[in-house]
Amino acid sequence: MINLYVFRHGQSIYQCLRVISGLHEFGLSALGKYQTYNLASRTDVDFEIAYISDTKRTIETFEMLKLAGKMPPEENCIFTPLIREKCQGDFVMQEFKAFPDDPNKRNFTPQNGESWEDIQVRVSKTFDFLVRRYLLQQKKAKHNDDEYVKALFQQSQHIKSKKNNIILVTHYGFIKEIVHYLKKADQLQLEQPYFAQNATLFTLQLHLKENQNWQAKIISLNSYTRQYRPFMD
């Protein structure tokens, strides 16, 4: 079994300015750092492996989690582009209001950016990696040639995990697509849409039998609240 903790970064400065973030940004606001540290100080989990999106706001979130003493040793912390936020292409650095009326449509793709289906592919690769890595420990993993997944295997091959407590430090859009991916695979039954707020945990247990046979069980939404609350800047 894999205990998967998905952490959304704290409030960013660009969120305060209501500007669309890209790779070049200012990182977390003071409130975002407080949000992250506050939740981390109330989290009693022994994380063994951390996978962190390689953007400034998630790196600073990771640093606050580490400051709170909640991160594994540095050699067990891996930064990866696989779990980045959806690339908004030519909308980056523009105000939120520059978006079309309904940017959440599945077929909406910003020029020079990613579609939601592109994020879905990255989510699928992430779960594929997590499952394969677990099975590798069980001597049952199959070979995978995907560039990002192969890189993660190489970076984490030295890590031994007993409890399989894994944390992903990522973004709203990526978490949104995790939920969509699991619902599409009939792994989750949610009566209402799930919106990841700033600095909150989305917790799953993955029960595995073989590479393509696993089931997800939802443990918590938005940290300890188990409530469906709207996304807030």
Image (cartoon, rainbow, N blue to C red):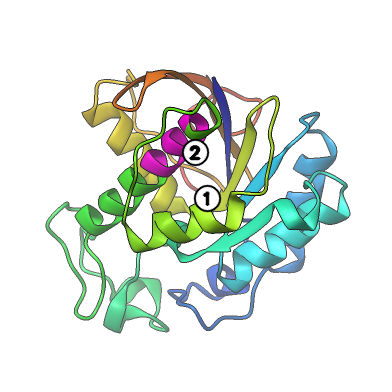
* Quarter-of-image position of residue 40: top right
- Residue ID for mark 2: 133
Q: Residue at coordinates 46% horizontally, 76% vertically from top-left?
A: 19
Q: Position of residue 233 (x, y in %)?
A: 54, 57
Q: Residue at coordinates 45% horizontally, 77% vertically from top-left?
A: 22
Per the model, the C-alpha gap separating discs 2 and 1 is 34 Å
Residue 154 horizontal side relative to residue 209, left or right: right
Q: Which mark is residue 47?
A: none
Q: Is residue 125 magenta?
A: no
Q: Amino acid at mark 1?
A: Met
Which mark is nearer the camera, 2 or 1?
A: 2
Q: Position of residue 204 (x, y in %)?
A: 52, 26
Q: Position of residue 108 (x, y in %)?
A: 16, 62
Q: Residue furthest left?
A: 107
Q: Nearer the viewer, residue 113 or 53?
A: 53
- Residue ID for mark 1: 232
User: Which quadrant holds the N terminus?
Assistant: top right
Q: Judging from the image, what secondary structure is the residue with disc 1 in?
A: loop
The mark nearer the N terminus, 2 or 1, is: 2
Q: Nearer the viewer, residue 33 or 157?
A: 157
Q: Main secondary structure of the magenta part?
A: helix
Q: Amino acid at mark 2?
A: Arg
Q: Judging from the image, what secondary structure is the residue with disc 2 in?
A: helix
Residue 159 horizontal side relative to residue 152, left or right: right
Magenta range is: 127-135
